[in-house]
């Protein structure tokens, strides 16, 4: 897959403040990383959160850049340059044009929210494939293009990588892309140059306040996905919005496109009636704008009823029949690291889940509470170098719904894991005033903590291992080490003499 175009053509898609030199220069590659500059590259200098790309313009020119796009006036010698008002936004727009405007050539489904994005995108992909479509997937677990699966470095990739992925989907025969759209990506204009057809809002609860600072800033970042559902080259656009979430009504108010709402407790366009939950799955009747349908799913928990309603809304908007929806939902088994059971012949239940916010942990625990017949043993920690305000809240949530709580390391990164757990412990101690019978302990080593939880479990107990889900690594300091909660739990069970 090769691309080349004139700088003049690229410059026609951004707001230009100043231009100089021969804009008929052929651009053979485009990058915002001076280390990857090749002869004939266009280097885009982006002013980042920590590093200012303008500092690396001389290195890019020395490396063979044929032209430069910048935001600040910087000397580039004799090569052509274009100065724009916002080089971060320009990066996505330039990337889109360079790779042939791929988002205009496929249906684009964007899913945003604090929790539920991964499950919703997986279900959307399955339902749309039931229509005979080839569907690409971009999200937290992996990027998928046909049979090619690439582990995801970020929930939403960088602007240029995203446009390149979408271009590969187009050339690979995909007619639809389903992607998780993170608040970081929206705030950093990584999705600039993307035209979405359907936008889904799952919920908004505290997370990422180390980056966004306030919940309002966090919400405003999410809102961009919906206010962007206007203009462009395509029609037939829609938002699918969880109206049970208090932020949902604000999105409905500001969204310029038609909206379908979904809810369990509020009157909405898509509702779930007669909900039945069990450890084997979920059943309900979905009332939709085109009729009702009986749903049986292997996905567990009330939170997955929300995820299913959202995906059903997307599928119906995209032309699925109720029969196609019913049949496709029934075939979905599980989503990696989302209420994923570890089955190794043991009599007790072991579940691995990605829950890493207070709200997600509460959803996991309340689901477990409705299904339990024995004790709930919860193992979790909080990531380092991330939102510290949620740590005591997660500690309180764990005590409210568990019988045994084991605090351990998540991805401590460059923070002291003992200090992280001390902050979580503050919430634990506060909640113990109301539930003094709950046992808790701190075990810094995550492998040891999981092993201890499994040894503690008996008969009808349920062990919940929260925080990392599908991740197969642990970040300690600045290094990644192989670590998979599912593998560790299975090994711990087998050490007790059980075998699948």
Image (cartoon, grey):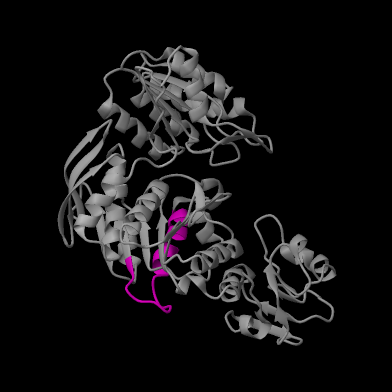
Residue at left offset 29%, top offset 60%: 315
Q: Left or right: where does residue 321 sit relative to residue 339?
A: left
x and y, in percent, of residue 276 in the image: 19, 37
Compared to residue 451, the image places residue 108 above or below, namely below
* Residue 172 in the image, given as x and y percentages of width and height: 50, 65
Does residue 32 appear to the left or right of 123 in the view shown? right
Magenta span contains residue 215: no
Is residue 421 visible in the rendered image? The answer is yes
Q: Nearer the viewer, residue 437 or 378?
A: 378
Q: Nearer the viewer, residue 332 or 464?
A: 332
User: Magenta stretch containing residue 224, yes or no?
Assistant: yes
Residue 224 falls in which quadrant of the image?
bottom left
Residue 407 visible: no
In the rendered view, tell whether residue 303 sits above or below residue 14. above
Q: Where is residue 31 drawn, in percent x and y?
A: 69, 66
Quadrant in which residue 241 is drawn: bottom left
Q: Give the range drawn in magenta.
A: 216-238
Image quarter where the N terminus lies is bottom right
Q: In this view, does 319 lie to the left or right of 361?
A: left
- The answer to whether 438 is drawn above or below residue 298 in the figure is above
Quadrant occupied by the C terminus: top left
- Could you tell me how many numbered marks the image carries? 0
Name the side, left or right, on which 491 lies relative to 333: right
Q: Please identify the quarter of the rendering in which residue 413 is found.
A: top right
Residue displayed at 54% across by 31% down: 484
* x and y percentages locating residue 51 in the rendered image: 71, 57
């Amino acid at each position: 897959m090769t691309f080349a175009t004139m700088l003049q053509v690229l410059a026609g898609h951004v707001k230009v403040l100043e231009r100089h030199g021969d804009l008929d220069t052929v651009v053979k590659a485009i990058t915002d990383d001076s280390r990857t500059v090749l002869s004939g590259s266009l280097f885009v200098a982006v002013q980042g959160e920590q590093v200012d790309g303008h500092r690396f313009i001389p290195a890019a020119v020395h490396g063979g850049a044929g032209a430069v796009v910048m935001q600040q006036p910087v000397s580039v010698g004799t090569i052509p340059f274009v100065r724009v008002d916002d080089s971060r936004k320009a990066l996505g727009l330039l990337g889109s044009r360079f790779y042939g405007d791929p988002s205009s050539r496929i249906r684009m489904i964007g899913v945003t929210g604090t929790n539920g994005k991964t499950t919703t995108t997986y279900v959307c992909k399955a339902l749309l494939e039931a229509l005979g479509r080839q569907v690409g997937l971009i999200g937290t677990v992996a990027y998928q293009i046909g049979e090619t699966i690439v582990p995801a470095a970020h929930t939403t990739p960088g602007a240029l990588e995203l446009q390149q992925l979408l271009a590969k989907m187009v050339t690979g025969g995909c007619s639809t892309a389903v992607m998780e759209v993170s608040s970081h990506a929206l705030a950093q204009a990584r999705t600039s140059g993307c035209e979405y057809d359907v936008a889904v809002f799952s919920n908004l609860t505290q997370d990422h306040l180390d980056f966004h600072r306030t919940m309002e800033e966090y919400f405003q970042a999410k809102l961009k996905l919906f206010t962007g559902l206007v203009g462009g080259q395509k029609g037939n656009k829609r938002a699918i919005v969880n109206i049970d979430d208090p932020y949902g009504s604000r999105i409905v108010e500001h969204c310029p496109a038609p909206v379908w709402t979904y809810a369990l407790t509020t009157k909405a366009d898509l509702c779930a009636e007669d909900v039945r939950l069990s450890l084997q799955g979920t059943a309900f009747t979905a009332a939709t704008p085109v009729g009702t349908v009986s749903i049986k799913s292997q996905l567990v928990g009330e939170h997955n009823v929300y995820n299913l309603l959202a995906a059903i809304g997307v599928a119906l908007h995209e032309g699925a029949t109720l029969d196609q929806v019913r049949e496709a939902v029934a075939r979905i088994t599980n989503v990696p690291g989302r209420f994923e059971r570890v089955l190794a012949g043991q009599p007790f239940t072991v579940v691995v889940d990605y829950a890493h916010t207070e709200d997600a942990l509460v959803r996991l625990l309340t689901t477990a509470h409705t299904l339990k017949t024995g004790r709930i043993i919860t193992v979790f920690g909080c990531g380092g170098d991330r939102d510290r305000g949620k740590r005591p809240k997660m500690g309180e949530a764990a005590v409210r719904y568990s019988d045994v709580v084991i605090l351990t390391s998540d991805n401590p990164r460059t923070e002291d894991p003992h200090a992280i757990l001390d902050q979580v412990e503050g919430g634990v101690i506060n909640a113990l005033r109301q539930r003094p019978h709950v046992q808790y302990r701190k075990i810094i080593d995550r492998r040891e903590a999981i092993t201890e939880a499994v040894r503690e479990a008996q008969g009808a107990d349920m062990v919940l291992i929260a925080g990392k889900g599908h991740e197969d690594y642990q970040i300690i300091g600045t290094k990644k080490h192989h670590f998979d909660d599912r593998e560790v739990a299975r090994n711990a069970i087998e050490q007790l003499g059980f075998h699948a």
